Every structure is written in structure tokens, then in C-alpha cells.
Image (tube, rainbow, N blue to C red):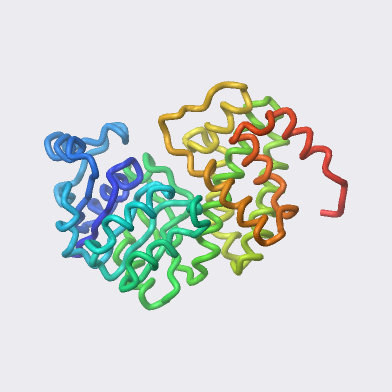
């Protein structure tokens, strides 16, 4: 039986562990908080996922050493926590394949998740698992298609086979930059889509925002070396559609609260907030700030530098041009 490790017992990490367990894999799920370990061991139920049950072949541990027998380890930590986790625990992670399951850019370094993995664990093959996916859907057995970004097609093929089953359908892609940036940038556009709906601008305005936002995603990602066709796949366009049209998306809900003039939920991780700041920093470094007007506005709004009505008016007042 294939053994897979999962680091992080939040909603997404637990959902992946449940899905992989149902697909017949032996899974070791690591949780940072010993109280979470105790609760999951005793109840076998995830309250974060509406009572989804852990299969018998999913074990829960607070000791990272228990993941040593796994050839593949999924890192389901928040993007802004990944660098710190790897700096502290990287030497313990001995798996051949380390797969990031977070979306965004590190605010401190502007690096993507695979770059952080390569820096901390140079002996491992760094990959990213990304695409349109809600944890609750995965945990309750609803089929989900994802992209596995890996620079080595041979290594990617092996992990693709290890993760795929009747719940998770994995497509591989050697364009790691494109896979990473698609998942990162769509979170920012999802905040903007939430603002549009929260402010009462309507569905037509959301469709326009998504279209121009996607053009922005492709423009910026290709400038950093991504292939345009990657952004048109699951990790870009597919994920954009999901997160801009569903209130299951934390980024969308965050934007909707801003659009309504309400205080967003501060208890949940909203990756698009830090990512917008990191993208703006990167764009300034490249002299490409003019290429990301939506992202620039979201960075300013989420930092409280400008009000939502001002941001909307600024975007609507941009010079008219050919599409």
C-alpha cells in the first residue's frame, strides 16, 4: 500500500488525507496542535469539514518523524507559514517528493512555494498541487481535478499515479511557475470579485472583472516565464472561475465584506491579501506595475490605503483602449 504523508491538519490537509485514504492509500496526517491530534484520534471526525470521517488507513500524529516512511509528503500549510515551517523542520522531512498544497507568494521573499522547498530541502523534488478545489468537496468524496506542477516529468508521473483515484484526478505540468502563479493570482482577483458583488455592482460587472483579471494574470505570469496555456488550465482559469463565483472561497468572502463596508472575518487565512502585496512588490521590481491594475488596487484596499469606492472609480476611469 502506498504511504503518503500530509503536513497540516487544517481543512485542506485533512480533506486530502481523507480522499487519499478512501482511494486506498496509507496516510499519516501530521497536526501541529496535540489537542487536534487527540481529538481526531478519538472521534475520527473532522469538525472543520462538516463531520467528515477519517478512513481507518489515515493515522494522525504530532511527531514529524512518523512521516519518514512516506515517499511523498504533501505540505498543506498556509503560504505565509510555509517558509518558517521549512526553516524549522526541513531536516526532518526526508521524503523524496515534497508537494506544496498552498497558493500564493511569500511576502518576505516574493518566492513561490517550490522555491522555499528547494531552499530548505535541496535533496527533495519540489512540486506544487493546485487547481479548483474546496476542502469540503474533497472530504465528502466529490470528484476534483487538480494540476501537479513538477519540473521533472518522470517524477511528476510517479506522484500523479500515487495521488490519483476516484476522488482526485491529477494532471501533471512541467510549467511550475505557471502553476504557482495561476493559483496565487486568482486569489487576488477573487477578492476583487467579492468586492464587486458586495458593493452591489452586479453579475455583469463581475464577469467583466473576471475577464480583465484573467488577462492580468496571463500578462504578469508570462512576464515571469510562465506558459500562457498553463494559465488557461486548471491552475489558472479553472481556479479563477471557482473562487470568483462561490462564497465557499475565503478570498471571495473577504472581498464581499469589504464591498459591503463590513469588517472581514479575521479568524481565517485569506491568502490573496499577502499575495497582492507580494505581487505589487515584484511588479515594482520589474517596472511592471502598470500591468496589474486590479492587483494594485486590491493591495491598497486590503491595506486600508484607499476606500472601496475610490478603487472602483479609479479602475473605471482608466484610459480607454483596444482589448
In this view of the protein, which residue sits in the foreground, 115 or 176?
115
Q: In the image, is 44 to the left or to the right of 187?
A: left
Identify the residue at horizontal 29%, vertical 65% (top origin): 162
Identify the residue at horizontal 49%, vertical 67% (top origin): 176
In this view of the protein, which residue sits in the foreground, 66 or 2?
66
User: Where is residue 72, by image quadrant?
Assistant: bottom left
Identify the residue at horizontal 62%, vertical 61% (top origin): 221
Q: Is residue 57 visible?
A: yes
Residue reaching furthest left?
A: 42
Where, quadrant-wise, is the N terminus in this rendering? bottom left
- The x, y position of residue 138, in whole percent, is 36, 46
Identify the residue at horizontal 50%, vertical 54% (top origin): 105
- The x, y position of residue 300, in whole percent, is 65, 38
Q: Is residue 166 visible?
A: no
In this view of the protein, which residue sits in the foreground, 228 or 185?
185
Q: In the image, is 204 to the left or to the right of 54?
A: right
Amino acid at each position: 500500500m502506498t504511504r503518503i504523508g500530509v503536513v497540516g491538519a487544517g481543512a485542506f490537509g485533512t480533506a486530502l488525507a481523507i480522499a487519499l485514504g478512501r482511494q486506498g492509500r496509507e496516510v499519516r496526517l501530521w497536526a501541529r496542535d496535540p489537542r487536534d491530534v487527540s481529538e481526531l484520534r478519538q472521534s475520527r471526525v473532522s469538525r472543520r469539514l462538516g463531520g467528515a470521517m477519517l478512513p481507518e488507513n489515515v493515522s494522525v500524529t504530532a511527531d514529524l518523524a512518523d512521516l519518514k516512511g512516506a515517499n511523498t509528503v504533501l505540505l498543506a500549510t498556509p503560504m505565509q507559514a510555509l517558509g518558517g515551517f521549512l526553516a524549522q523542520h526541513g531536516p526532518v522531512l526526508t521524503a523524496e517528493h515534497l508537494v506544496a498544497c498552498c497558493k500564493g507568494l511569500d511576502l518576505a521573499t516574493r518566492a513561490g512555494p517550490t522555491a522555499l522547498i528547494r531552499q530548505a530541502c535541496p535533496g527533495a523534488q519540489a512540486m506544487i498541487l493546485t487547481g479548483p478545489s474546496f476542502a469540503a468537496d474533497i472530504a465528502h468524496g466529490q470528484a476534483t481535478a487538480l494540476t501537479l506542477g513538477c519540473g521533472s516529468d518522470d517524477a511528476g508521473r510517479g506522484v500523479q499515479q500515487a495521488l490519483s483515484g476516484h476522488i482526485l484526478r491529477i494532471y501533471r505540468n512541467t510549467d511550475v511557475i505557471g502553476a504557482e502563479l495561476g493559483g496565487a493570482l486568482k486569489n487576488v482577483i477573487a477578492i476583487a470579485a467579492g468586492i464587486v458583488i458586495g458593493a452591489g455592482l452586479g453579475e455583469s460587472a463581475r464577469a467583466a472583472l473576471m475577464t480583465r483579471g484573467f488577462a492580468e494574470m496571463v500578462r504578469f505570469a508570462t512576464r515571469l516565464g510562465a506558459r500562457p496555456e498553463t494559465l488557461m488550465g486548471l491552475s489558472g482559469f479553472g481556479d479563477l472561475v471557482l473562487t470568483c463565483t462561490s462564497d465557499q472561497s475565503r478570498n471571495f468572502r473577504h472581498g464581499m465584506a469589504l464591498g459591503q463596508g463590513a469588517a472581514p472575518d479575521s479568524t481565517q487565512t485569506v491568502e490573496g491579501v499577502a499575495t497582492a502585496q507580494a505581487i505589487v512588490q515584484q511588479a515594482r521590481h520589474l517596472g511592471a506595475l502598470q500591468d496589474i491594475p486590479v492587483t494594485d488596487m486590491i493591495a491598497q484596499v486590503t491595506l486600508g490605503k484607499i476606500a472601496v469606492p475610490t478603487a472602483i472609480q479609479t479602475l473605471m476611469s482608466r484610459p480607454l483602449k483596444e482589448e
